[in-house]
Structure formats: C-alpha cells, structure tokens
Image (cartoon, rainbow, N blue to C red):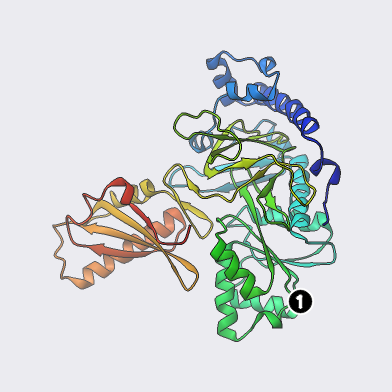
Amino acid sequence: MPIWDRKTETVDREAMQQMQLERLQTTVNRAFRNVPFYHRKLEQLGIEPEEVLALGDVRKLPFTLVQDLRDAYPYEMFAVPLKEIVRIDSFAAAPGRPLVMGYTARDVSHWAELGARMMSAAGVTREDVVQVAAECEALVGGFGTHYGVERLGASLIPAGGSTPERQVRIMQDFRSTALVSTPSHAQHIMEAMRTVGVSADDLCLRVGLFGTEPMTARRRAQIESQFGIVAAANYGISSVTGPGIAAECEIKDGLHIQEDHFLVEVVDPLTLEPLPPGQPGEIVITTLAQEGLPLIRFRTRDVSSVTYEPCRCGRTTARMSTVTGRTDGAVSIRGMHVYPEDIQALLYDIEHVEPHYQIVVDSRGGLDVLTVRVELSSALISDQMNKIMALEETIRQRISLDLGLTVDVKLVEPQTLRDVPEGKRVIDNRER
C-alpha cells in the first residue's frame, strides 16, 4: 500500500510526541505574541507560554469556540500581518458574522501536502484522473483536495458547480478514475446515472474520497455498489482547515489523524475533562503548523473516539472513528451544520407564525431531505390556503438566504409544537 510521507506517517510514538510538543510550544508562543484573543485569555488564566513543558500541559490552555472566531471578524485572529496572507476564505456558519480563515504561503503548501497524504491513503496515484465534484466556493474543502491532487501529481478535473448530469458526462468522456465529493452529492450523481441509463460498467471509476458528512455503513455500501468503487472517508473542518485533518486508508479501520499538524484531544462534553483512548467524546483540535490562523483547543462539537494502535496499513498515526453526532444539537445535512436555534431566530421575524418548530431529516431515494415544521399563529385563519402557501414560501426563502439551505416547509395548526420537548426538536430518520 502506498504511503505518501512514510517518514512521518510511520514514525514511532515517542518521536511523534516530541515533534508535537515542539510545535505546540511554537504555536502557543505565536498565538500569545500575535493574537490579542489568546494573549488576553492566557493572561486571564495566569499562564505563560514557557509553562507548556509537556504535551499534557495543553490542558492548561483555554478552549476556542466558533463564537470566538465569529467575534474576531474579519482579521482579529490572524497571527501574521495581512500582507503575509495569500488566501482568505469566508463562510457563514450561522446568521451573523461569517467565519474568516487566513493562510500564508506555507500554510497553503502544508494544505497541499495533507491533501496528497489523504489521496495516497485512499489508493490514488499519479496515474489517476481525479474528478473533484466539490464546489470550492461553497465548501472550503474543495480547495484542499484540489491542492492535494496537484501535489500528488495526478490529473485533476475541477468539476465543482457542475450539475449531477454533467458530472456523469465528465466521468464518461474524460474516463475519471477517482471521485472526490460529499456523500450526499455522490448520491445525487447516482440518481443522475439511473436517469440517463449509465451503470458502473460504463465508467472507469475505481476509488472515491468522501468528506464533510458522516459516512454510515449503509451509505458507503450504496456508493460502492452504484459506482463500483472503494469509498474512503475523510475528515476536515472549514474553521480549522479543509480536508486533511484525518483520512481513511485502504484498510478502512478508522481515519488516520495527521498528528504532525494537529494535536487531537477527546473530552467529556459536560466536564471538558480528557477521556481515555477508545471512549467517544467531543473532538478538540490544536493546530501545530498553522501560521496565519493558529487555533488552540478548538471545540469542534463533533463526537468521535481515538485509538493509538498501529494500523495494518503500516501507518502509526492515531486513528479517529467516523463522527457519530454533535454535542451542540446541530444536524449535518448536505455538508452543512444546521443549528435549531438559528431556525428559531428566523421565525421571530416572520409574521403569522410562532417561534415553535420541529426539524425532520429524512433520506428519500438515498438523498437527504430536511423539512421544517412551523406552528401557525392563531391570528391567521388556517383555511386560507393561498396565504399559507405564500407564508411557507417566505420561510423557505428566508432559510435559503440566511442559512444557505434548501428545505421543505410545512405549516401546522396553532399550539401543535409549543410543548414539544427539546429532545424532540430535531428528528433524524436517517440511519446513524
């Protein structure tokens, strides 16, 4: 099995921990000197960067939240002058200020290296023709895979933004051998294949890399069967970096964490205390090589577990399990996190409805569909169908504009949803 960076990916545990410690110390010093947020946080805790003498000392450091990044809009979290930033990515995680990520030239080079490792782990080589179906403008991860393919030396087809039918045509005409996509977009392409009468035998695909959304066993089986490929999952977070934090190898027994770039902790989401290997909890990430925007103990809100046992592929890096949920109540759909409180906030501004709602996620024909059930105000006569249809369309448009999501909206009778317990605000009917 090919290993892109054998020296780093097969290093022994002691050497890896020493490398992590040295890079952690550099990161904390850089953040303390150059990022007002971290300077203030460390001073409040009475911590000097020189006190980080062992990897375990990371637990003394403050956590970083998504809200901290939003409050720092646009450049307050940057650790270098703006003239040293060569890439700026901005995306909305929720209504309000968007998140902004900045990369130096070295950061971009590191990103390409991580992408190449991810590609190689899945079995992609320089002989492959890689079709990247992720849209770079919508998903930051599109750039990471783009850079990774180029670093690997394979042929790249940047097909983001193409319709599913166009994706199928590209696969046929250009004889793509590898596909990069989100699982849900892959299922849209599968639907297009069935519509135009194309089967796996008509394609040259042999491997696929899928990220942004959890890869369930059923979803993997559907994708592998329909495309006739081996499907490998990968993990990345736009607010940390795109894909490349962790990725499956051909063994598919957990996602290999790029430990020389990311220090990963698993903590109890209630006590925030560290959990032992193998026990699921919230993933917390500290970047170890980011120059433009270093992050210390970023709470991802993703639930997973980590093992440090070497893999049969030969890599010795720690592995994380597929993400099984969130600790903040968010639901992942089509590569985006939907926060129930954001839906509720929108409803307060819309006339004739109450801020009582229920989110229902289904899988129809293998595709994720989100329906928002909203309670009508008693002031509106429910048999005025034309007004109800117009109101549903208003809510759909507001959710699309503010959250970037296409949803179905179903208005229900007054006093139907106001007493729904918090644990039932989100109903996810998809297989977990």
- 320 versus 34 height, above or below: below
Q: Give left or right: position of 121 versus 33.
A: right
Q: Say whether residue 115 is left or right of residue 96.
A: right
Left or right of 225 on screen, residue 401: left
Q: Is residue 418 above or below residue 126?
A: above
Residue 244 visible in rendering: no
Q: Quadrant of residue 306?
A: top right
For image coordinates 33% across by 64% down, the residue present is: 409
Q: Residue at x 79, y 44 (%)?
A: 9
Q: In this view of the protein, can residue 131 be seen by the observer?
A: yes
Q: Residue 285, relative to residue 117: is it above or below?
A: above
User: Residue 309, located in which quarter of the rendered image?
Assistant: top right
Direction from residue 20 to residue 100 in the image, left or right: left
For disc 1, the marked residue is: 175
- Locate residue 173, reporting x and y percent: 74, 80
Image location (x, y in percent) of residue 342: 38, 48
Residue 278: give x, y in percent of width and height.
59, 40
* The quarter of the displayed image where residue 320 is located: top right
CA neighbours of label 1 inside 10 A, class few (<14), some (14 to 19), many (20+): some
- Quarter of the picture containing the N terminus is bottom right
Work out whether residue 281 or residue 407 is closer to the camera in this orientation and state it.
281
Dot 1 lies on which element? Answer: loop
Task: Residue type at mark 1: give it.
Answer: Arg
Q: At 54% across and 16% down in the image, what residue appears?
A: 45
